[in-house]
Amino acid sequence: MSAHPDLAAYFFEMEKLVEAQPDSVVAEIARGAYAMSPRPRVRHGVAQGELFAALRRLGAVTDASAQADWMFVIEPEIRSLETFSRLVPDLAGWRRSTTGWPDLDATPVSLIPDWVAEIVSPATESFDRGPKKDAYGLMGVGWLWLLDPDSRTVETFASVRSKMIAGPAFGASDHVSAPPFESLRLPLDSMFPSG
């Protein structure tokens, strides 16, 4: 018997726990750390939907012969055995011209996205800002945006040598314009409901 634990075997066992959870629970593994959270609040869904719609408009193709470069997916399951991670970002984007697009019929997806966004909540904030952010950097995700509907802010991060480094941050009266979507200019007050 080896004195070293078989980390892959532990990861495979944790994946069985992820797969056994009901749809009412989001179960994830970040760098070998297992976490479960309840389904999000409506406030979370509004922010997620507004960001998705803005990104779809940004990537809209007006020329019938052209193809979109970006593909955006709401809550895909991303798997990386190398980082012992199986994550569900709130929104993910793949760029055809860099990584290509994932297999549309695969779940979990093994092609790492270029960009991800997380809408933080009181139940997920420490996981999103800790192990999950670190796992995204190690997996090779290029950019991470953290949206906080309660504080009405967006924080951006870029991967530098497999670590997520803080970039521009935006408040409620700002327009988001950050890598990789510098031309977006999304007004935050439209994304975060006040009710």
Image: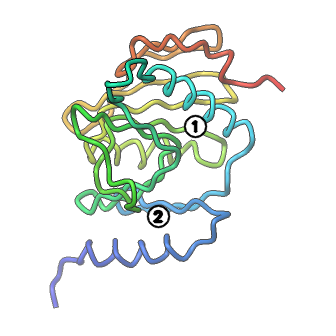
Q: Which mark is residue 34?
A: 2
Tell me which numbered mark, 2 or 1, is placed earlier along the sequence: 2
Q: Which mark is residue 154?
A: none
Q: Amino acid at mark 1?
A: Ile
Which x, y percent locates residue 15?
Answer: 41, 72
Name the image quarter holding the C terminus.
top right
For label 1, count other residues whose C-alpha is less than 10 Å away and answer few (under 14), some (14-19) or many (20+): many
Which x, y percent locates residue 134?
Answer: 35, 44
Furthest-bottom residue in view? Answer: 1
Q: Is residue 148 left or right of residue 162?
A: right
Look at 49% across and 70% down and name the residue there: 18
- Colour scheme in use: rainbow
Give the label, 2 or 1, closer to the camera: 1
Q: Is residue 49 left or right of residue 58?
A: right
Look at 67% across and 29% down and name the residue there: 149
Instruction: Look at the numbered disc 2 and give the secondary structure of its residue.
Output: strand
Residue toward you, 11 or 180: 180
Which x, y percent locates residue 62?
Answer: 43, 18
Instruction: Look at the numbered disc 1 and give the secondary structure of its residue.
Output: strand
Q: Cβ–Cβ below 8 Å for labels 2 and 1?
A: no
Residue 161 drawn above or below residue 11: above
Name the image quarter holding the N terminus.
bottom left
Which x, y percent locates residue 34?
Answer: 47, 64
Furthest-front residue in view? Answer: 64
Residue toward you, 157 or 20: 20
- Based on the displayed image, in which of its 4 quarters is residue 84 positioned? bottom left
Q: Amino acid at mark 2?
A: Tyr
Q: Which residue bears the numbered disc 1?
A: 119
Mark 2–mark 1 distance (CA, rounded to whole Å): 19 Å
For label 2, count other residues whose C-alpha is less than 10 Å away and answer few (under 14), some (14-19) or many (20+): some
Q: Is residue 154 left or right of residue 7?
A: right
- Based on the displayed image, in which of its 4 quarters is residue 5 positioned? bottom left
